[in-house]
Image: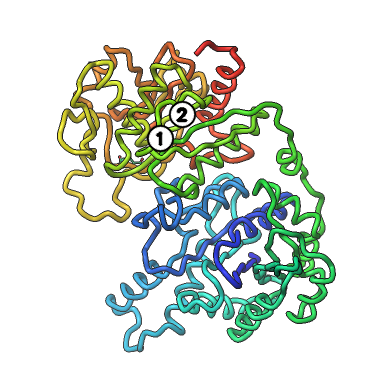
C-alpha cells in the first residue's frame, strides 16, 4: 500500500479535496486502484449533526455513514464506494481511545496524545486504506487528505501521525503533497511568500513537501515555479500549477498537462503504464443544447446541494445538454418566475421554514406541466401537495411540520428516538420498481439500490386513497413508499431516497437523466407542456 498525504496551506477552501481526488483520478487512469481517506479535525463524530448552511452538504455513504462532502468528490472522481471508515474525525479518534481507557486496555499507562491518539489515528488510516473497495478489491494507493490548514491546533495530532507514518514506511511508499494558495498582488504578480511560510510551518512539524500544488485564478509560470522550488526546497517539476477551471472534472486533465503523474510515479516508484483516456474525452465533450432548472431551497449556499449540482451536470453531459441552475429562495420567490424554467427541482431538507413555498412550486409544476424532480423532502411535499390539491384535504401535512392530517408520518422505528446523531433511516436499501411506470422506464430494472437519509415516510393509512386519486407509487421497500409519480405529465417523479449520492460522471443517475431529457424535450416542443 502506498500513501499520498495531502495537506493544505495558507487558507481553507482552496479545493484541496478536488485536487486530491484529481490526483487519484490520474493514477486510476493508469490502471491503479485508488482509495481515499478524509480527515476532519473537528470533535463531531460525523457530519450528520452539522449545519449544512455552515459546512456544506452532509454526504451519505452506502453503509449509511453521514460524512463530509469531500467523500462525495472522491466517490465521483474515483468511481468507488467508500465506507464510514474513510472519514476520520477527532471525535471518532477520541471516543475510541477513551472507550479503550475505560475498558482498561491501556492498563496502568498514562493515556496521552502521543502515542495513544497518534497510534489510534495511524491504525484508523491503515484500516481504511486496506478496506476492500466493492467491485475493485484492495487498493494500491490511498489518498489521505488532512482537513484544515497547517498550523491549526486541531490538526496537530493528525500531522504528527502522518510524520510518524512517513518515518515508519519505506521512502517510496509515501509522498506528501502540499496544496497552497498563490495569490496575485494589485500589479498582477503572483506571490510566493504565503507558500514559503506555510512550507516552513510544515517543516517545523517534521514534514517535508515532495510536491506543491499552487492554486489560484491564473496558471503559475516557470519563473514563479523556480522561486517556489528554490525557497521551498524541492525540484521545479514538483511544483504543479492548478489554476481554477470552469468545470472541476477538467482538473485531472490540467494535472496531466502539468506532469503530475510523472512526478508521483517517480516518488512512489510506480511503473510507467499506458493512460486510459476515457475520462479526458468524457469531460471534453461539447454541449449541443441548454436547459435551465430552478432549485427551490431555503439555504443560500450552493454547497448544501453539491451532489445535486454534480448529478445534474453528469446527466447533462450524458445528454450533451448544459444544465444551468437557478437557486430560488423557498420563502421569497415569485410564482411568475417558476414559468421561466425548463424544470423544477425540490431538494431534501429539514424543518418548517420554506415548506409552503416548496409545496406551491410543486403545485405549479404539476398543474403547468413543467418537469419536476422531487428528492426526499421534495418527495414528501409532493405527496402533501397531491393530498391538499387533488384530494382536497386542505389540512394535509407532514408530522415534521406540525398539526394536521399527517399524510407524511414519523417512521415507526423513529418514535421515541431522542439522539440526533446517526439515527435516521440511512444508507442503502433495495427498492422494487412497479411495471409500466415512469420509474421502470428510467431505471429499466425491477430492483434498484439507492441511499437514504430521513425520519418520515408516507403514512400507510392514506396510500389507498392517494392512489385512487391518481398518484402512482412506483417504487417501494416493503410497505414503505419510495417513489411517486403523476401520470399524464411530461415528467413528475419524486423519490424518498437520494439518487444524487450515487451519481458519477461516468455513471449518471437514472432519475437525473430522465429529468434532463424531459426538460429538453419540453423545451424543444417535442412534448407538449
Ligand atoms: N426532513 C425529512 C425527513 O426527515 C426529509 C429528509 C431529507 O430531505 N433528507 O424525513
Residue lying farthest to the right in this orientation: 222
Image: 259 above or below 362: below
Which mark, by number, is residue 19? none
Look at the numbered disc 1 and say if its residue's Cβ is closer than 8 Å to ligand 1. Answer: no
Q: Residue at x 78, y 65 (%)?
A: 263
416 or 142: nearer the eye?
416
For label 2, being within 8 Å of ligand 1 is answered no
- Side of 194 where 109 appears, left or right: left
Tell me what residue is drawn at x 32 percent, y 39 percent.
354
Q: Quadrant of residue 355?
A: top left
Indicate whether 177 appears above or below 282. below
What residue is drawn where x is 20% and y is 53%?
418
Determine which residue is flagged by label 2. 337
Q: Is residue 174 visible?
A: no
**Label 2 crowding class (10 Å Cα cut-off): few <14, some 14-19, many 20+?**
few
Q: Nearer the viewer, residue 489 or 85?
A: 489
Q: Position of residue 17 (x, y in %)?
A: 58, 58
Question: Which residue is the site of mark 1?
Answer: 333
Q: Is residue 419 left or right of residue 274?
A: left
Give the structural element (helix, strand or loop) at label 2: helix
* Direction from residue 76 to residue 464 in the image, left or right: left
Is there CB contact under 8 Å for labels 2 and 1?
A: yes
Pinpoint residue 4: horizontal percent, then vertical percent: 64, 66
Label 1: how many Cα within 10 Å (few below 14, some 14–19, many 20+)? some
**What number of labels is visible?**
2
Amino acid at each position: 500500500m502506498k500513501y499520498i498525504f495531502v495537506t493544505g496551506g495558507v487558507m481553507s477552501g482552496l479545493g484541496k479535496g478536488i485536487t486530491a481526488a484529481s490526483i487519484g483520478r490520474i493514477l486510476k487512469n493508469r490502471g491503479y486502484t485508488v482509495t481515499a481517506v478524509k480527515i476532519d479535525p473537528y470533535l463531531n463524530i460525523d457530519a450528520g449533526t452539522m449545519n449544512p448552511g455552515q459546512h456544506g452538504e452532509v454526504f451519505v455513504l452506502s453503509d449509511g455513514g453521514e460524512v463530509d462532502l469531500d467523500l462525495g468528490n472522491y466517490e465521483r472522481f474515483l468511481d468507488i464506494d467508500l465506507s464510514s471508515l474513510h472519514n476520520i474525525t477527532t471525535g471518532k479518534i477520541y471516543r475510541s481511545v477513551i472507550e479503550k481507557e475505560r475498558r482498561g486496555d491501556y492498563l496502568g499507562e498514562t493515556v496521552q496524545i502521543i502515542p495513544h491518539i497518534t497510534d489510534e489515528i495511524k491504525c484508523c488510516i491503515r484500516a481504511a486504506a486496506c478496506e476492500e473497495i466493492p467491485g475493485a478489491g484492495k487498493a494500491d494507493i490511498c489518498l489521505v487528505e488532512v482537513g484544515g490548514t497547517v498550523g491549526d491546533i486541531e490538526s496537530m495530532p493528525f500531522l504528527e501521525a502522518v510524520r510518524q507514518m512517513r518515518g515508519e514506511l519505506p521512502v517510496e511508499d509515501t509522498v506528501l503533497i502540499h496544496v497552497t494558495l498563490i495569490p496575485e498582488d494589485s500589479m498582477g504578480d503572483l506571490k510566493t511568500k504565503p507558500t514559503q511560510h506555510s512550507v516552513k510551518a510544515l517543516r517545523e512539524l517534521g514534514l517535508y513537501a515532495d510536491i506543491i500544488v499552487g492554486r489560484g485564478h491564473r496558471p503559475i509560470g516557470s519563473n514563479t515555479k523556480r522561486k517556489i522550488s528554490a525557497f521551498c526546497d524541492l525540484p521545479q517539476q514538483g511544483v504543479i500549477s492548478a489554476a481554477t477551471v470552469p468545470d472541476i472534472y477538467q482538473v485531472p486533465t490540467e494535472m496531466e498537462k502539468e506532469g503530475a503523474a510523472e512526478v508521483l510515479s517517480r516518488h512512489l516508484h510506480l511503473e510507467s503504464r499506458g493512460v486510459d483516456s476515457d475520462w479526458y474525452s468524457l469531460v471534453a465533450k461539447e454541449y449541443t443544447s441548454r436547459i435551465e432548472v430552478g432549485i427551490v431551497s431555503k439555504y443560500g449556499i450552493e454547497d448544501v446541494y453539491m451532489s445535486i449540482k454534480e448529478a445534474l451536470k453528469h446527466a447533462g453531459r450524458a445528454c450533451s445538454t448544459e444544465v444551468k441552475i437557478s437557486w430560488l429562495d423557498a420563502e421569497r420567490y415569485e410564482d411568475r418566475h417558476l414559468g421561466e424554467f425548463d424544470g423544477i427541482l425540490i431538494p431534501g431538507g429539514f424543518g418548517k421554514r420554506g415548506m409552503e413555498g416548496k409545496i406551491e412550486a410543486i403545485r405549479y409544476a404539476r398543474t403547468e406541466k413543467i418537469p419536476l424532480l422531487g428528492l426526499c423532502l421534495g418527495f414528501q411535499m409532493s405527496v402533501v401537495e397531491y393530498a391538499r390539491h387533488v384530494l382536497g384535504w386542505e389540512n394535509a401535512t407532514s408530522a415534521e411540520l406540525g398539526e394536521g392530517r399527517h399524510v407524511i408520518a414519523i417512521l415507526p422505528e423513529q418514535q421515541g428516538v431522542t439522539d440526533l446523531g446517526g439515527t435516521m433511516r440511512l444508507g442503502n436499501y433495495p427498492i422494487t420498481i412497479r411495471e409500466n411506470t415512469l420509474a421502470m422506464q428510467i431505471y429499466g430494472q425491477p430492483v434498484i439500490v439507492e441511499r437514504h437519509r430521513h425520519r418520515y415516510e408516507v403514512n400507510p393509512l392514506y396510500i389507498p386513497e392517494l392512489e385512487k386519486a391518481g398518484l402512482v407509487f412506483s417504487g417501494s421497500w416493503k410497505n414503505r413508499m419510495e417513489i411517486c409519480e403523476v401520470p399524464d405529465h411530461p415528467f413528475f417523479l419524486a423519490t424518498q431516497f437520494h439518487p444524487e449520492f450515487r451519481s458519477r460522471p461516468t455513471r449518471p443517475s437514472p432519475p437525473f437523466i430522465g429529468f434532463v431529457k424531459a426538460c429538453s424535450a419540453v423545451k424543444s416542443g417535442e412534448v407538449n407542456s
